[in-house]
Amino acid sequence: MAEAFKFELVSPERLLVSEQVESVVIPAAEGEMTVMAHHAPVMTTIKPGVVTVKTASGEEERYVVFGGFADIVPAGCTLLAESAVAVNDVDRADLARRIQEAKEDAADAKDDEARSKAEQFLSQLTTLEGAILPA
Amino acid sequence: MPSLKDLRNRIASVKATQKITKAMQMVAAAKLRRAQEAAEAARPYSERMGSVLANITQAIGGGGDAPALMTGTGKDDVHLLVVCSAERGLCGGFNSQIARLARDHIRKLLADGKQVKIICVGKKGFDILRRDYASMILDRVDLREVKTLGFVNADAIAKKVIHLFNEGGFDICTLFYSQFKSVISQIPTAQQIIPSGIASAPAEAVDGGSAVYEYEPEPGEILSDLIPRNISVQVFRALLENAAGEMGAKMSAMDNATRNAGEMINKLSITYNRQRQAQITKELIEIISGAEAL
């Protein structure tokens, strides 16, 4: 039984999760990372993906986040997400719309840097779609 | 002197108005509660955002790699004002207060020889500012169709502002909105969002100081991602406060209107009764004097 720590998932509209958890898997910008108690202080941006929370009572909850950043300190972890929803409540039409928008962004990009950024975002979104749709 | 029938009609119409204002007051009260809840729910995010920003600016230590959004362009020639007001009227002095603050600000800037650009959020502020400063209004954002304010709305506005900044459209951006203090008091506020001014804050208040953060990716990169987001959050907060303020102002305005209508009905009823009595007396006198003449 791993030690529990405080995890908070906040979106601009509301506070989604604030509880004691065992571990959290975060889709960080440079690869997924699992956060457990007494993690070294890290600050990272996150990409669109699934956050898996294992609560202290052993249940597993999954949330979809679209970008944001995480602030990890030994005492806890705060995830500030641009928008976050529980996996079961994901609106597929909304996801499809986001992907469509990302595609348009990639098509409209003026310079190479913007284009590669938009394309990267798009691929992250499609991976995300693939990850949650069969669920 | 109005006839009895006129008075009756008048009373009926004031009563109808009173019913409407009463209904509006109750609607505003219900909406106010929702708006307040929304504003409260959004608070944790902006608080955390603030503390994270403070942390990271400390890590960078005001180094040269702070993004321009934070440090500004180093000039203050062109000012952009984002004026947030309500979409609807009938809320007392709410909109005119915000517009007045903005107008004073504009006048001062113009007197100093600065260039002013305006983005209006909400219809009412636009209507007021259009009279004097139509040529300076770049854009207006319409939130009329928006039922519940979401972060996306604020994000869209912030993106517009940031885009303009990156194109060199302005040097300093100030946000005008009404701070929600209580139901009866809303304070029009001007808040500078670009440059954010965090960089110039003294780098003290190290809480614990032990936390040596690791950054992934580089702090500068995170910061350049964070600052635009922070602007969105500021705009979002302003919009939420505005929404709550509008409903508060509307509630008290409608409460006053209902009370005034009640007073008016009282006065009119008294006049009506007096006149009715006068007419009865007159008729009686006519009958009696007629009988005496016989």
Image (cartoon, coloured by chain):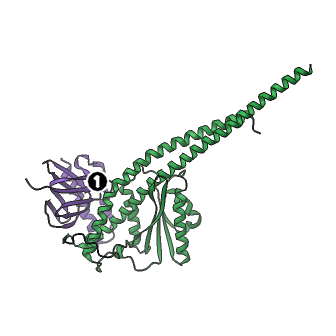
Q: Quick check: B205 above or below B144?
A: below
Residue visible at 28% across and 72% down in the picture:
B205
Quarter of the image holding residue B224? bottom left
Residue B265 at x, y percent in the picture: 64, 39
Neighbourhood count class around disc 1 (C-alpha, 10 Å): few under 14, some 14–19, many 20 upward? some
Quarter of the image holding residue B65? bottom left
B247 left or right, relative to A88: right
Residue B161 at x, y percent in the picture: 41, 67
Pointer 1 chain:
A
Residue visible at 78% across and 30% down in the picture:
B279
Q: How many marks?
A: 1
Report whether residue B241 is seen.
yes
Under circle 1, the secondary element is strand
Chain A drawn colour: purple
Front residue of B13/B119: it is B13
Chain B drawn colour: green
Front residue of B253/B230: it is B253
Residue B243 at x, y percent in the picture: 44, 54
Q: Quadrant of the C terminus of chain B?
A: top right
Residue visible at 53% across and 52% down in the picture:
B91
Residue projecting furthest to the left: A1
B287 left or right, relative to B96: right
Report whether residue B121 is seen.
no
Residue B158 at x, y percent in the picture: 39, 64
The residue that disc 1 covers is: A15
